Each structure stands twice: as C-alpha cells, then as structure tokens.
Image (cartoon, rainbow, N blue to C red):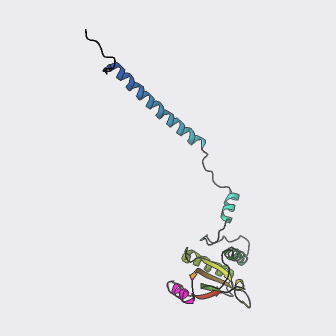
Amino acid sequence: MASRDPYAKSRPRKSDRRTWLLTGVAAIALVVTGVILASSHLDAATPSPSPPSPSSATAVSAVREGFGTRPDPPVMEGGDEDEAALAELAYINSDDLTTVTPAGQWVAELAERSGAAPVEVLGEHQRMRREMASSDHPIVLLRTSDFGTASGTPRWVTVALGDFLDAGEVTAYCRSLDTPTCHPLQLLPR
C-alpha cells in the first residue's frame, strides 16, 4: 500500500473553491454597500449653502485690500456722490500710503487732477488701476501733500510704482503705455 505524503499538495475539491468564490463576492458586495451608505449619510449631514443674509453680503463687500482691482464703490442712495467719492479716495489713499514711503524713488505719474469732481478723479483712478496695474507696476493714489514740498491745495495723483532707477527708466516705461499722460516723478520725503 502506498503511503501518502503529508506534505504533498492536494488538489482542492470543487466545493471548496466555490465556497471561497462566494465568500469573496459576498465580502465585496458588503464593502460596496457600506461605501454607498456612508457616502449618502455624509451628503445628508453636510448643510447646503444658504443664500447670504443682507448683513453678511454688506460685510463681504466692505472688505478692502490695497493694490487690488476691486469694483467701483456703490453710489450711496440719498447721499452726495462727491462726498461718497471723496470718502473712497481718502480710503484708497490711506491704504496705498501703508505700502509707499516717499524716499526719493522714481515713479510714473499717470494722472494729476486739480479742480475735477471727486467722482471723475475716482473713476479715472479705478480705471487705471484695473487696466494698467501689474505685479511689477502697482497703481497707487497719492496726494501732492504726501510727498515733496507741495504748496497750495493738495491734488490727487495716480502713479505707477516700479524699480525705476532714474527718470530715463520711467520715460521708457511711459512709452510702453497707451495713456495720454505719463511722465517721471520723484517722490521726495516731506
């Protein structure tokens, strides 16, 4: 009688293979069902975004950042447009002054308005800021009283900042622009 080797591989019976196959399929089905249920539970638990309340919309629109290309300010109902424009010009100016310290650097003067309505000055400055500002040449709003030895009534001045070494570099920059006015200006300390 032939002895059987206990270490020899035996061929599994058909019923054993079928059992393993059915067990595997059942396990995969359970995992897929669990993933689907968990996903639908998470979707139901996540709150849907609700429309902003009027007070939150107002707070968001009031956030301001320097050197940005933000939209024009809304016209105040029942208020004076010039007063609203002056307030916005003053805000832009104070915001821009936090990043510019007159120390003899050269800038490109793009506009200087004296005697113009504040709404016109604001509109012109915002247009230049939107259309001409870049990371190399941010557009800022200054007053002539912010630098140099200004005399008389302070005027609004829109300038482009940059790493200009002298008036010649500013002139070269000005030639690259499509604007009626652009010339070198040195921001001397007060």
Residue 132 in the image: state x and y as whole percent: 55, 77
Q: Main secondary structure of the magenta part?
A: helix
In the picture provided, is 184 more to the left or to the right than 9? right
Which residue does the image show at 54% across and 89% down from the upper left? 168
Q: Quadrant of the C terminus?
A: bottom right
Say above or below: 58 vs 133.
above
Residue 31 in the image: state x and y as whole percent: 47, 33
Q: Which residues are magenta?
A: 164-174
Q: Which quadrant of the figure has residue 187? A: bottom right
Which residue does the image show at 38% across and 22% down from the upper left? 19
Is 64 colored magenta in this rendering?
A: no
Residue 157 in the image: state x and y as whole percent: 65, 84
In the picture provided, is 22 more to the left or to the right than 71? left
Depth check: 123 or 169 in front? 169
Count all numbered tags in the image, as a single digit: 0
Q: Which quadrant of the figure has residue 59? A: bottom right
Depth check: 159 or 170 in front? 170
Q: Quadrant of the N terminus?
A: top left
- The residue at the far top in this view is 1
Depth check: 141 or 121 in front? 141
Residue 14 in the image: state x and y as whole percent: 32, 20
